[in-house]
Amino acid sequence: MADKKVVEQLGQVPLLADLSRWDLGRIASQGREVQHPPGHEVTEEGGRAVGFHLVLDGGAEVEIGGESRAALKAGDYFGEISLIDGKPRTATVRAGADGMRTFALQAGEFSAILDKHPELARPLLLTLCGRLREAEERGRERH
């Protein structure tokens, strides 16, 4: 059985928010917990995208172009789009001074879930469409 805390936190990720607890449990059962020591580079900007991370404990710094852009804490996540498109990372994420523990799900594991349970794709597509519309609207507001 998947960890209830992980299932609850996965339900807070916008991409996954419309999935049922049952479906979130399926996803949670395919990932694993990973401990990242202090300063460990979890992802490298421009590097190969291998999946999604949900921060369970500790924190991390997000850097783009060598500049600090954000701090991540428990409940935050990164790499959700790489679950789908597999494109290179857009940022470097480095574990903070106390290290970090994440729930990690590789893109291949997620693809296997979608292959076995294609009904999960519809809510994901609807969420992605909503995010695309929001981005388009923000772009129109800037012009």
Image (cartoon, helix red, strand yellow):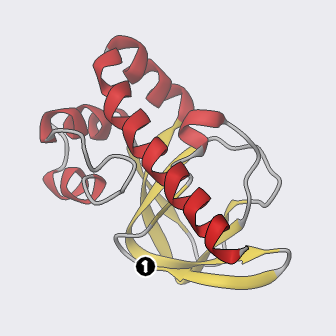
SS class of the residue under badge 1? Answer: loop
- On the image, which quarter does residue 85 sit in? top right
120 above or below 128?
Answer: above
Q: How many marks?
A: 1
What residue sits right under mark 1 in the picture? 73
Q: Position of residue 12 (x, y in %)?
A: 28, 60
Q: Position of residue 98 (x, y in %)?
A: 50, 84
Instruction: Name the kind of residue labelled 1 in the image.
Output: Lys
Left or right for 82, reference 53: right
73 above or below 11?
Answer: below
- On the image, which quarter does residue 36 sit in? bottom right
Left or right for 98, reference 3: right
Left or right for 5, reference 60: left
Q: Residue at x 25, y 44 (%)?
A: 18
Q: Nearer the viewer, residue 24 or 6?
A: 24
Q: Residue at x 18, y 59 (%)?
A: 5
Q: Which quadrant of the rendered structure holds the C terminus?
A: bottom right
Q: Position of residue 52 (x, y in %)?
A: 51, 48
**Furthest residue toward top:** 116
Q: Nearer the viewer, residue 42 or 52?
A: 52
The local crowd at label 1, few if under 14, some if 14 to 19, many if 20 or more residues have their Cα within 10 Å, is some
Q: Position of residue 101 (x, y in %)?
A: 43, 65
